[in-house]
Amino acid sequence: MTEENTAAPTLTVQLKMLDDGLEPPSYAHPGDAGADLRAREDVVLEPGERRLVPTGVSIALPHGFVALIHPRSGLATKHGLTVVNAPGTVDAGYRGEIAVTLLNTDRHEAIELKRGDRIAQMVIQRVEHARFLPVEELDGSVRGAGGFGSTGGFGAQA
């Protein structure tokens, strides 16, 4: 890679590999937002089945950061594999093994994952902590209290 294609890390995160036989989280391409996480064990997910899959990874995030666990788009598109609680949340204070709750959304085919397969991606982001201020009334907005479907969409009539 040339120097212009490599991204310099902007944050140091302590990483403890719980399984020496697995590759640590890594970015597939320069500029990628998500670092790939791998399955610590072989898994077969039948249609509609979900399972908590360990990754062999634990981290110590600095205060003010979160790791969000997202599905891998290729697995989602080709096999219907997704993360149930997407994105999963790894808080800065958590020090245990990162595990991913996977779901096979395919109606007919099982999906077989082998130890070491890339199963999810971890995106690390800053977190803002809010101070919640009780008020009698909220400031107005253009949208107001309009909720689900209030802005139109599929099949919306004009």
Image (cartoon, rainbow, N blue to C red):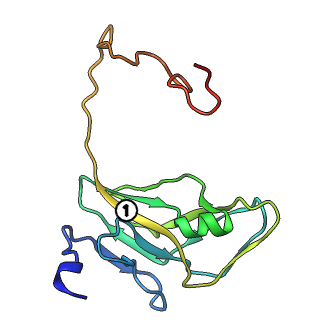
Amino acid type of the residue that numbered disc 1 sits on in the rendered structure: Val
Query: Is residue 80 shown left or right of residue 39?
Result: right
**For mark 1, does the 10 Å Cα neighbourhood hold few (<14), some (14 to 19), or many (20 or more) residues?**
some
Is residue 143 shown above or below 72? above
User: Residue 82: percent from the left, percent from the top?
Assistant: 60, 60
Q: Quadrant of residue 36?
A: bottom left
Query: Is residue 66 shown left or right of residue 86?
Result: left
Q: In this view, which residue lies farthest toward the bottom?
A: 21
Is residue 75 shown above or below 6? above
The residue sitting at 29% across, 13% down in the picture is 139
Query: Is residue 83 shown left or right of residue 12?
Result: right
User: Residue 135: percent from the left, percent from the top?
Assistant: 29, 12
Please name whichever residue, 112 or 107, is drawn nearer the observer in this view of the structure: 107
Please name whichever residue, 35 or 40, is drawn nearer the observer in this view of the structure: 35
SS for tag 1?
A: strand
Please name whichever residue, 22 or 5, is drawn nearer the observer in this view of the structure: 5
Is residue 98 shown above or below 132? below
The residue sitting at 61% across, 33% down in the picture is 154
